[in-house]
Image (cartoon, rainbow, N blue to C red):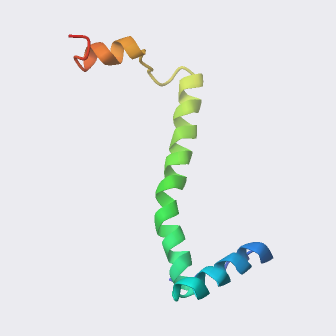
Amino acid sequence: MPYSIRLKPGIKARLDALAVRTGHSKAYHLRELVANGLDDLEAQYTAVEVSERIRRGEERTYTLDEVRRDLGWDD
């Protein structure tokens, strides 16, 4: 599915240089960035959501001692 995005001149120049250096198209590198970066972006938003639930007291947290005991590492 085609998309249109605006890039700052500095980012565009870096993308152009990368395409020349690697022999891959700019579209190829943009697809790679989206595919590889999407996992990181989703993880970042999940971390923020969990942090907010913890602050509101809606998410259970565990001490290191509890984790060690539950995993059997204290044996």
Q: Residue at x 56, y 76 (%)?
A: 30
Do we see residue 26 in this rendering? no
For the C terminus, the image quarter is top left
Please tell me in which quadrant of the rendered image residue 7 appears. bottom right
Do we see residue 40 in this rendering? yes
| Near-viewer residue (65 or 23) | 23
Position of residue 72 in the picture relative to residue 10 (left or right): left
- Provide residue 56's location: percent of width, then percent of height: 58, 23
- Provide residue 28's location: percent of width, then percent of height: 51, 82
Please tell me in which quadrant of the rendered image residue 67 appears. top left
The residue at the far right in this view is: 9
Position of residue 6 in the picture relative to residue 55 (left or right): right
Q: Residue at x 51, y 54 (%)?
A: 40
| Near-viewer residue (65 or 59) | 65
- Provide residue 66's location: percent of width, then percent of height: 35, 13
Q: Residue at x 28, y 13 (%)?
A: 69
Q: Residue at x 58, y 39 (%)?
A: 48
The residue at the far front in this view is: 21
Image height check: is 12 above or below 25? above
- Number of numbered markers: 0
Image height check: is 57 above or below 24? above
